[in-house]
Amino acid sequence: MKKAVGWIVLVLVIYYIGTSPGPAADIAQGIGDGVAEIFRNIGVFFSNLAD
């Protein structure tokens, strides 16, 4: 069941990217910026912890 749901989600994501590449790119960029911010904050935390 999980495998089927995964395939369905993958097909829907590919369809969305194919039909709306601009908004899909904006979403991907937002996710990437969020992940980068998380790692930046983790670095600040450990930097402050070491001081």
Image: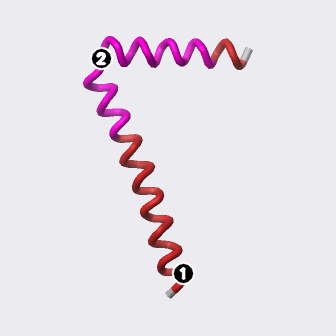
- Please say if 23 is above or below 39: above
Res 2 quadrant in image = top right
In 3D space, how far apart are the residues under numbered discs 2 and 1 (Cα atoms)? Answer: 44 Å
Q: Residue 51, relative to residue 39: is it above or below?
A: below
Residue at the image position 33 percent from the left and 39 percent from the top: 29
- Residue 51, horizontal then vertical, whole percent: 50, 87
Q: Which residues are magenta?
A: 6-29
Give the quarter of the image for residue 24.
top left
Q: Which residue is mark 1?
A: 49
Q: Residue at x 41, y 48 (%)?
A: 34
Q: Label 2, secondary structure: give it.
A: loop
Is 13 magenta? The answer is: yes
Could you tell which of marks 2 and 1 lies nearer the N-terminus?
Answer: 2
Kind of residue indicated by mark 1 = Leu
Q: Residue at x 29, y 20 (%)?
A: 21
Q: Are marks 2 and 1 in contact (CB under 8 Å)?
A: no
Q: Position of residue 11 (x, y in %)?
A: 50, 12
Assess disc 2: are there few (<14), some (14-19) or many (≥20) residues with their C-alpha within 10 Å of its C-alpha.
Answer: few
Seen in the image, is 19 located left or right of residue 1?
Answer: left
Within 10 angstroms of label 1, few (less than 14), some, or many (20 or more) residues?
few
Residue occupying the far bottom of the picture: 51
Instruction: Write down the residue under mark 2.
Output: 20
Going by the numbered disc 2, the residue's amino acid type is: Ser
Quarter of the picture containing the N terminus is: top right
- Mark 1 residue element: helix
